[in-house]
Image (cartoon, coloured by chain):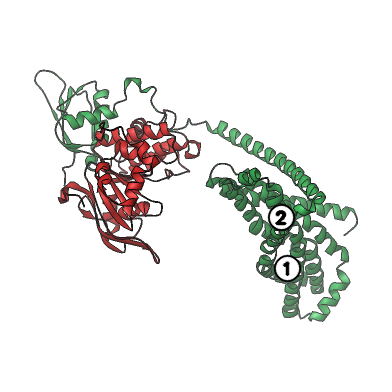
Chain colours: A red, B green
Amino acid sequence: MSGGEQGEDLAICVRGLRTSFGDQVVHEGLDLDVRRGEILGVVGGSGTGKSVLMRAIIGLQPADEGEISVFGESTLNRDDEDTLALRRRWGVLFQGGALFSTLTVTENIEVPLREFYPQLAPHLRDEIAAYKIRMTGLPADAGPKFPAELSGGMKKRAGLARALAIDPDLLFLDEPTAGLDPIGAAAFDERTRQLQQTLGLTVFLITHDLDTLHAICDRVAVLADKRVIAVGTIDDLLATEHPWIQEYFNGPRGRAAQPPKGGKDQR
Amino acid sequence: MTEVAAFTLEQREESGAPLLRLSGSLSIACLGELPNALEALPGPVGAIDIGGIEHIDTIGAWLVYSLSQKWACEIRGADADAQRLIDAVKPSADAGPPPALHADKLSPAIRILDQIGGATMVALTTLGGLVGFLGAVMIASWSLIRHPSRFRWNAVIQRFEVVGVSALGIIGLMSFLIGIVIAQQGAVQLRAFGMEILTVNLVGRLTLRELGVLMTAIMVAGRSGSAFAAQIGMMKLTEEVDAMRTIGVSPMEALVMPRIMAAVVMMPLLGFYASVLAIIGGGFMCAISLEIPPVTFVQRLREVVPLHDLWIGLIKAPVFGLIIGMSGCYQGLLVKSNAEEVGLRTTAAVVQAIFMVIVLDAFFAVFFTWVGWT
């Protein structure tokens, strides 16, 4: 594992996690640290449990064993009230956007505000939704539309706006660029980077998109064999011998996505 | 953890407008009642000082920014973080028009007219679509008659099982209970005239002529019509139907025809079965509460129920089956975009099928009386 493990610098700290569905064990003895203010990319083959890891951290998937703490507070075995307090500190963008289909985009963005902070005046809520729509790059006429009327890229942006509605410190993104065209994906990456820097976010980013990894991730964690086999910058990972990592970053697609030699535009 | 956000107003010597000094944590979790209190300030304010705040997020930044706009005053003491957030929430000059948030509200009168018009259009287009679909079904049947080798026996037999055999239990139980109810209620009313024996007429004629087939149709529409719509709708969503077309399989022949055939063939069988069980239920009730022994019941049944009552039921049943199968498949094929639509279409298929079955049943009743089958 990487160094710098002072408790207060870690946004997420996972130790010895084990999760399973019946007999099928997904994670066994998984350790992972996410530092504050970084974008951590999580990669791994299909079925290695990237989404399950995210669901375990945000408490949707019960862990059989192990410790998970977010901002120094354990997420396991908390009562409902406490869990709610912790949930205000993160926003999640699910793979398909997971927008509530019966609500308009504006109403979707306002749901977390309404639930967590009912004392906010409705007009303030509208104003907040308006600048979130602007910040995430949604078109000006998107507010009154229903999710079914949006394109894939716009659904992702609306999902991002909802995830950012209550100004979380931690943002979970599950394959944000999957299904977007390259231009849309690059724009989404750029937007994520920009928001992360402006808002000082910590981002936990699951992706299959090699361009995203190269463009915006500070570090990358590789999931294989039921645990995190390596964490580090892409250069660090390239120095390891693990065949899957070599295949992943040095395969035909991996090479194409690499930035030109010498031009290290990490950060 | 952090201090709750608060504000003070300070009177300054040089000018009349006071200075608004914000303190504490200007983040959404710590705002509390601050936005409402600031809203209520009489104003105007000369300047906003945020030098004393501990922490700020975009919501705090928006609050500060909108206040500075409201009173046209400057923001003082913003550190780099605060300035960055204020710049982030500020609408930039090139951002274009402010985003629309809610759809424009129509006036109630116009909205009612809009809904009536919309519903009428939907009803008419559905009716037109169904007539078109009936044509498509006829064409598909004709081409199957001309090329019997394309007929999918396996699919049809499988549908027979799902639509017919699996429904035997529930339809049987339902009919038996309905027979009991008719006999019991009929007996109560007829007793007033001392004509309890007419209960047999009531049970026999009503179930064979109307209720057996009608209740079966309602049950089949709920069980199978909805399943047709949901299955075909999901196949449309996952593009299975399009995949079929590209491979050269006609969805009409592979998906629609087996289901419609199953509904058309199974409805008379189930309807007959339902009538028989309803009569058994009625006979059971007569034996228990009216002390009419089963032998007498059957004898009387043969005397008072004309054979054409059975024919009426059996003629109506396949027509009802056609309607149920068609509206299920038609609504399923109309699914386009999302999973929510599958639910709506399934409901529409059932409601439509039951409605049309009852309307047609009324026509049949008038027609058969007119031809003399009373």
For the residues labelled 2 and 1, the Cα–Cα distance comes to 36 Å
Residue A58 pos. (x, y %): 32, 52
- The residue that appears at 77% across and 54% down in the rendered structure is B149
Numbered badge on residue B65: none
Residue B309 vs residue B374, the one in the foreground: B309
Q: Which one is earlier in the sequence, the residue at label 2 or at label 1?
A: 1
Identity of the residue furthest to the top in this view: B14
The lab-note entry on whether marks 2 and 1 share a chain reads yes
Q: Is residue B6 above or below residue B237?
A: above
| Snapshot quadrant of residue B100 | top left
Evaluate whether residue B193 shows in this view: no
Evaluate whether residue B65 shows in this view: yes
**Left-right relation of A240 to A146:** left
- The residue that appears at 22% across and 25% down in the rendered structure is B43
Numbered badge on residue B182: 1
**Left-right relation of B116 to B41:** right
Going by the numbered disc 2, the residue's amino acid type is: Pro
The C terminus of chain B: image quadrant? bottom right
Going by the numbered disc 1, the residue's amino acid type is: Ile
Q: Which residue is mark 2?
A: B258
Residue B190 pos. (x, y %): 77, 70
| Snapshot quadrant of residue A209 | top left
Say few, some or many: other residues with alpha carbon within 10 Å of mark 2 (under 14 / 14 to 19 / 20 or more): many
Write down the chain letter for disc 1. B
- The residue that appears at 16% across and 51% down in the rendered structure is A7
Residue B60 vs residue B293, the one in the foreground: B60
Residue A3 vs residue B351, the one in the foreground: A3
Residue A212 pos. (x, y %): 34, 38
**Left-right relation of A36 to A222:** left
| Snapshot quadrant of residue A164 | top left
Marks 2/1 in contact by CB < 8 Å: the verdict is: no
Residue B232 vs residue B1, the one in the foreground: B232
